[in-house]
Amino acid sequence: MIRKGLIYLSISLLLGCKVSLTGGNFGESKTISVAFFPNNSSLVQPTLSQAFTEDLRNFFQTQTPLVLTQKNGDLQFEGSITDYRINPVAIANQTASSNRLTISVSVKFTNVKDSTKDFESTFSRFADFPSSENLGSIEADLIKQINQQLAQDIFNKAFINW
């Protein structure tokens, strides 16, 4: 496993690409900016915008060698939360036995150094929870879990070209 990592790192250095250990290719970019993502969904959760924006920033800070800037990064992310909803997903005895929290975000990615990498996409993830659970007591954990999945999806689209 270590040998494979060293080979990958050696090839990356020979090719002159700036790559992270997570496999992302950042080209010549050195900075990244993530604008605030307002919540434009019909159901507004008061802390969601701040939580999503911070989780996305933290993800990029821990998974890339890029320096986070307030604005005008070499790589720029902006967008909004477009959907936040709770739906029943499993019915037993004519009542919901399981519910699903879904969050969708619209993302515009701009690569100042290589405009061929720019994109605008919508990402959506969900987490199921028992209907017997009080949403208020587990909502923050569900949001954190979904935000991490969304951040990974956004990272993959921007840097791994998935």
Image: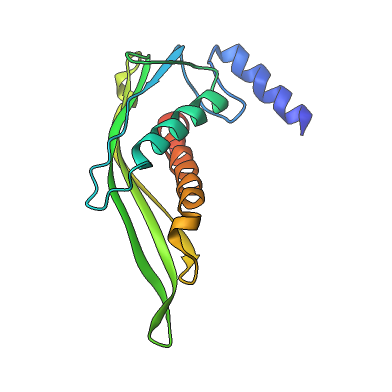
- Horizontal and vertical percent position of residue 79: 28, 33
- For the point 35% across and 13% down, the residue is 113
Give the camera-side residue of 120 and 44. 44
* Residue 34 vertical position relative to residue 69 in the rendered view, above or below: below
- Horizontal and vertical percent position of residue 38: 27, 36
| Quadrant in which the C terminus is drawn | top left
- Horizontal and vertical percent position of residue 62: 56, 26
Give the camera-side residue of 70 and 75. 70
Give the camera-side residue of 2 and 33. 33
- Horizontal and vertical percent position of residue 159: 45, 29
Q: Quadrant of residue 154?
A: top left
Q: Quadrant of residue 12?
A: top right
| Quadrant in which the N terminus is drawn | top right
- For the point 46% across and 11% down, the residue is 30
**Residue 9 in sight here:** yes
**Residue 120 in sight here:** no
